[in-house]
Amino acid sequence: MLVLAGLILTSYAAKLVVFWLAPNMSYADVTFQYLEQAHRLMYGRGLLPWEFVSGARPWLVPGLIWPGMEAARLLGGQAQAQIFGAAAVCSLMSLLVIPPAFLWGWRHAGSVGAVVCGALAAYWFETVYYAGQPLQDTIATFLLVPGVYLAYPDGPARSFRRLVHGGLWLGAALAFRIQLGPIVLLVGVWVARLDIRRYAAFVLGGIGPLLFLGLLDWATWGMPFQSIIRYVKYQSSSIGETGEGRFGFVPWYHYPGWILAYWSGAFALIVLTALAAVKRLPLLLAIPLFNLAVLETIAMKHPRYLYPGVPFVLVLAGIGGSLLALRLWEGRVPRWRIGAIGAVFVALTSGLLGGFGYFAATFSLGRGTILATRAVNADPQSCGLAIAPGSSWWLSGGYVYLNADKGLYGITAADPDFKAKSAAFNYILTTTELPGEPMEDFTGTGYEKIACYANGTRGPACLWRRPGTCDAKAAPPLKASLPPWLDEAKGRP
């Protein structure tokens, strides 16, 4: 158990260090659906994306990360520290995948398997990255893995109590990410088969988290399960926006392409070692394959949607690799040394793939916007920040990345009221979604370009500054635009 504790502690430390040293803003929903909404709970201000106008998202994630952010605020921390507090909470949740992986490895490949599988769960680059991101997808995965382990430790569990506990975790995963329903259904059918008693155990355990979601939606949105109902209602409309050339609409082969690109040189080793162990735990391969099959039927595609299957593939690879190592070296090399070498190999492979492989760009996406906003926060003379153009609000850091004493606005250089409105702010941030796109130019308006920051695969984030103070009432605060298909955008409730 000391080894398990060591894996958990070092994993937590590594995730926090990576989050601190490699700030990024890869997902607009992380910023505006979760961090920004937790910021609203704290300060009563923030941008409202359509999901939180219509009630298409539950308050689970903002409520989960709020304590970490509030703790940072009470300790005197401002925006940067509060975001780190949210990451600390999410990273803590990510540790839930380590004990199940460790125990699966122990059951099927002894102490070597426990160390290698535990190391894969602790240090794999995708988990290290997603650990700091408050996303429904990944938090739900962190809850899914313990649920599957309880229901399927070395085959279908038979204990009613164990299945109730497994159902509790699976239900919690569903509450955070209802789209995991097909995976949860697969696990339930695979384990329960024709045994009504096992199904009853799953339902008994899983109903509590789902009822909690219903009550939370009722308390916050006025109707039980509104977040699910509105999500289903609008999903077809939002996918309708993703026509050719738009975000998320890509051909089917992007999913296998992303897998090959992310795992690159390790792909063959992962596949071969996982296949070597699949007869022991076939459900662990069925989960990622089934998830991939379901995702291929949906027009909206994104690599992070594959993540719920990743921990299970890695467990199989850890077991298969450990069994192979034991066959080659047991009796000649002490088991503790084989396990230690395996853990080091995992950490080095993960570091190389995450730091220098295709995935590496994810760690730097949006960093320029963060650094530019930090520069504004660090200037004691700054009093307001404008995003140019305001329609690109989703490329900004919102209010959550800005210290609470500064206002946030939208502006364009061509605005006929520019001079009057610019009295509300003394900094302007310009950026674009893609490099090479034209950026707003404020030359001759009294603003001077003081810095541009590399922004990953986006256009650079450039800061403009003017001398003087601000009149917060000179311009309206920045607001998030709403999609035209939203009832609330049409004036309907």
Image (spheres, helix red, strand yellow):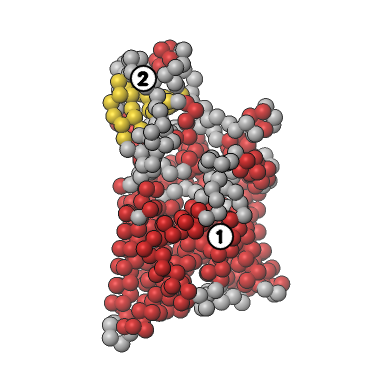
- Compute the Cα span from label 1 to label 2: 47 Å
Q: Nearer the viewer, residue 241 or 287?
A: 241
The amino acid pointed to by label 2 is: Phe
The amino acid pointed to by label 1 is: Leu
Q: Is residue 312 above or below residue 238?
A: below
Q: Which of the labelled discs sits on residue 381, or is there none?
A: none
Find the residue positioned furthest to the bottom.
331
Choose top left, top right, bottom left or bottom right for residue 408: top left
Residue at 62%, 31% in the rendered image: 484
Left-right relation of 138 to 114: right
x then y, percent, for residue 92? 42, 55
Q: Nearer the viewer, residue 70 or 157?
A: 157
Is the C terminus in the top left, top right, bottom left or bottom right quadrant? top right
Residue at 49%, 20% in the rendered image: 476
Left-right relation of 54 to 34: right
Q: Is residue 117 above or below residue 425?
A: below
Asked which secondary structure carries label 2, the reply is loop
| Mark found first going from the N terminus, 1 or 2 | 1
Say if residue 268 shows up in the picture.
yes
Q: Which residue is mark 2?
A: 442
Q: Nearer the viewer, residue 48 or 394?
A: 394
Is the N terminus in the top left, top right, bottom left or bottom right quadrant? bottom left
Residue at 47%, 56% in the rendered image: 257
Say if residue 80 shows up in the picture.
no
Q: Which of the labelled discs sits on residue 292, or is there none?
A: 1
x then y, percent, for residue 430? 39, 28
Left-right relation of 443 to 49: left
Residue at 33%, 75% in the rendered image: 339
